[in-house]
Amino acid sequence: MVDVETQSILVVGGGMTGLTAAIEAAEAGREVYLVEKNPYLGGRVAQMHQYFPKLCPPYCGLEINFRRIKNSGRIHVFTMAQVEYVSGRKGAWDARIKIEPRYVNEKCTACGKCAEVCTSEIDNPFNYGMDKIKAAYLPHDMAFPLRYMLDPSLAKSAEGQTVKDACQYGAIELDMQPKTVELKVGAVVWATGWLPYNAKRLDTLGFGAYPNVITNVMMERLAAANGPTKGKILRPSDGKAPQTVAFVQCAGSRDENHLPFCSSVCCMASMKQATYVREQYPDARIYIFFIDIRAMDRLESFYADLKKDANVTFFKGKVAKIEQDAATENLVLRVEDTTAGSLNMINVDLAVLATGMQPNTSVYHQPTFAERDDYGFIAAQEVTPGFFAAGCCRTPNSVSESVQDGTAAALKAIQSVVRR
Amino acid sequence: MDKKIAVYICTGCGIGESLDVDQLSTLATSECKASVCRNHASLCSPEGAQIIKDDIANEGVNALIIAACSQRVMYDVFDFEGTILDRVNLREQVVWTHPAKDEDTQMMAEDYLRMSGARMQAMLPPEPYKPEQEMSTDILVVGGGITGMTAALQAAKAGYNAVLVEQEAELGGFQKNVSKNVVFPFKDVQANEIETLAAFVKSNDKIKVLTGSKVEKLSGGPCVFNATIKQNGSTSDHRIGAVVLAAGWKPYDPEKLDKRLGYGASPNVVTNVQFEERAKSGKITRPSDDRALKTVAFIQCAGQRDPQHLPYCSSICCFTALKQAIQVKQQDPKTNVFVFYQEMRTPGQGEDFFRKAQSEGVIFVRAQAPEVLASGSKVAVEAYDELLGDKILLDDVDMVVLATGMVPATAFGEDYKAKKETDETEKKSELVASVDSIFVSDILNLEYRQGPELPELKNGFPDSHFICFPYESRRTGIYPAGPVRRPMGVSNAMEDATGAVMKAIQCVELTSKGLAVHPRAGDASYPEFFMQRCTQCKRCTEECPFGAINEDEKGNPLPQPTRCRRCGVCMGACPERIISFKNYSVAMIGDMIKSINVPEEYDEKPRILVFCCENDAYPTLDMAGLRRMNFNAWVRIIPLRCLGSLNLVWIADSLSKGIDGIMLLGCRHGDNYQCHFIKGSELANIRLSKVKETLDRLALESDRVRFEEVSITDYAKVPAMLDEFAEKLAEIGANPYKGF
């Protein structure tokens, strides 16, 4: 007889790769458990303003994927959840999932009454802390699942009760505790993705010290209509429109002292962000400081088009140091021009560091048996029979490659549980 | 189906405070003919849902109208087996976007309930399509290179039979001529394992290997494909479930290269492909006289990243050059090896391989336009070294290796559309959508009305939504993989093959249950054609974005339901309105329009009908609600499966009904189209422009109809768009047909 329990698939990570793996497997008839650390699905792409090279919103594709989840009925989603422990063998894995308290249960209708009465605020994690949000909040406008949550500080405070009383649906549970779920599954897809490299470690580039040095992921939020500036790209120091913007490539990547590998997407990401600036400020000047522009396959035409833009200067050279003019908070970039062998000082209003992709597997200890490469990636598709790594925890990927990887991992997972 | 209609009105989330629910209930039992109508303060709560379940069990209701929140939320709560369901979006698109206790808000809610009632009357439960023929789940893999072999093997491992077609006498494709490889995670060169893979494939009893063969004809559709395969002069027919297209690539023709690269001027100037042939034969030597190599120069981007040749980057040539450079170095460390590159492209852990080459002593020269000076066996390379800031001349080069790029096999052959236009004298359809390029590359030989191969997107690669859904071609059940889809190397191609097989398996699993594939995966409805009224106008067969409809010699459509994606573009195209789904039809939407209560002119309550794409524009409007943004209350919204399913008769219905303005909200079209059905929004826009011409002729202001492109994140803009249109209509004045 078929043992249903050992045919199910656990997908860890609800970003582009994990989402894809889960949906592809479910649409082929498999039961899937999808575990996501954030309170919503979509991962890093949920925080992107647009995709390169089409300059289209990620939510267009995500909405279809969410509808596929709704229609399949075979995907069990756990948000705010992490795998604490996983072990076993092909066809028989035990996984322990820890679910952090959301303080809001499934009765939530997303009516927003809790946020309406709530007065306390927190740094908005979705916008990398660039603005404040109520401590009772929807993670973001297009969050899936569409459900509010409370910050733990609110749940434990006196205001928590006021907020709870405002909910007509009994959705708020101030005493919600972390929960543990034990799962038995037949195969595991590990797709825990990446985190932006900590730009504060690039001590010569001034991130954290100078407000007008930001990172590429922050730039995505600045350009997004639901970002901290409602989509206007403004200097953090004074809210002014930047007239000169520098993109500093390989901020940490291809650097033996930081991330020795190439993060694959930062060239395209910066060029895409250059178009955000160009669209908002037709007179703005843009510098892109690079080692090699890596615009693979058809993406080359995006690069070719941008090179034609007279306001965009591609500058082959490494930014050695960023300093700030104390009076204006403008930035001075010291750049070694490898082409001319000269040293240049370039003044800009805003500098965007193209910080790289660090694999989450380099900082999270699970699964212990999966060997990491020198950089913390699980650099193998099949880690051990029945356990597969995919997406940016395996190698730095673009969105399209993550979908490719997630789709392939879904098949591998299915193969490992077939006819058991 | 004997329908017993029940209407459930939720009064939660502000609905009860905003609307006169009693009046809605009265309307439900009168106009919507509901036998049961109930309200609840929180219909999505377990208690609320229980009321509905009880009515299904005790009252026998089976046609449910739930007037509450958007269909996009609480989908799991409002899911009752054996019933048909319609959701009325009172929350996001009525009370959250309009003032409470307002006459216009109430009228809007009432209209939506009426429209739902009309829809419910017309709706039937879909019955999954079952073809008459026996269905197959076998996977046809076209191409026996590394991608195709991997695909066949992966399909077999998942329990499916595969038929592998390879045109050459032996399996292996391009890789069988390659001596060494570099694969993920790109640490070092290694032995090529293509022979091992071929042996696995040949010994797998689930794989039927047909070498020296080609697909002569492919007809039918998913699960009922008939593949006629010609092998050694004889043909055989195979019933196929889905197809993986792994036809691979051809090297860019070096004869076409710029003369400055020296190809043809000396035997010592070779391409990276010719290098492989030499390396495979053993020792790598100087081509002209087989002498040991002292100096070798690799020149990158030969005819690539160049609008005169290949405008794209072939992605793998940097890796290939590094690999070949290391091979030369490992053969003899004393050989001087130079790589002239514009941009070194070794993403991810590939950076390690770049360092590996450096540590082997390969010298890298960054130069934009190196020149090869060749005559006879003497070769030199001249370049401007950007790092030195000076011109360099590399003399006495024994061999120059040019990095030529990859051209997908689908990019060869003449353009089908161009050919057809010259062949046929028939008048072109008045409806001109953007023309698809299909190259007659003699790979699949589809018996499809729209052409024999997959349509290309760009540069001959046959994909469509390459960011979000990279395996989707525009022919259902045919999934391109490997370098035919995108330039890629060995590791990537193997992974790609695996992904494509996943899609193929999904396709046969869904199709064999009578369900649609992406993007409406799981949809059981399909279009049915009432042929007695067909006028053979061919619009449906021409406009289907997926080539799902063939044609007989008289011009009658021959629908192939398993090829259909259920977007309804054919339904929108048909002037005779003969194409319908059980739960989606021209008449159904027409009835919804007719159900709208249009006040008389002197009431000064104009009406605006909005047809919107349910995938992007509709969620945008929901988001506007979530943010409590306000928009004009004259608006009535009808979501469509795709804007391409818009039938022009609805515009006529609306205008003759007295509706003052019609707006279409669709996805971006053109080069960077976002329409999930490729051409839906473009076609809707074209149809609308035809209407505009007619309106002008009838002296009915064409500004009454408008098309707007909306993306899913435009929710901050959409309310203003609707308001502005309402103002424009106020200027124009009331629809003169009002009240007639």
Image (cartoon, coloured by chain):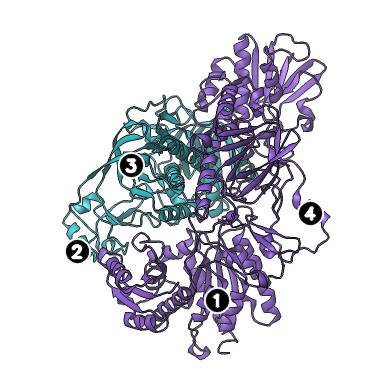
In-front residue for pair B515/B258: B515
Pinpoint the chain carrying mark 4.
B
Cα distance between the residues tagged 4 and 3: 55 Å
Q: Quadrant of the C terminus of chain B?
A: bottom right
**Residue at mark 2:** A165
Please report whichever mark, 2 or 3, sits nearer to the chain's N-terminal start: 3
Question: Could you tell me how far apart the alpha carbons at marks 2 and 4 are, in whole angstroms?
Answer: 70 Å
Q: Which chain is cyan?
A: A
Q: CA distance from mark 2 to mark 3?
A: 41 Å
Q: Are marks 1 and 4 on the same chain?
A: yes
Residue pointed to by mark 3 = A5
Work out whether mark 1 precedes mark 4 in sequence or the reverse, and give the earlier one: 4
Q: Is residue B492 visible?
A: no
Whether residue B48 appears in this view of the structure is yes
The numbered mark at residue B420 is 4
Residue carrying label 1:
B590
Identity of the amino acid at label 3? Answer: Glu
Under circle 3, the secondary element is: helix
Residues marked 1 and 4 touching at CB (< 8 Å)? no
Q: Colour of chain B?
A: purple
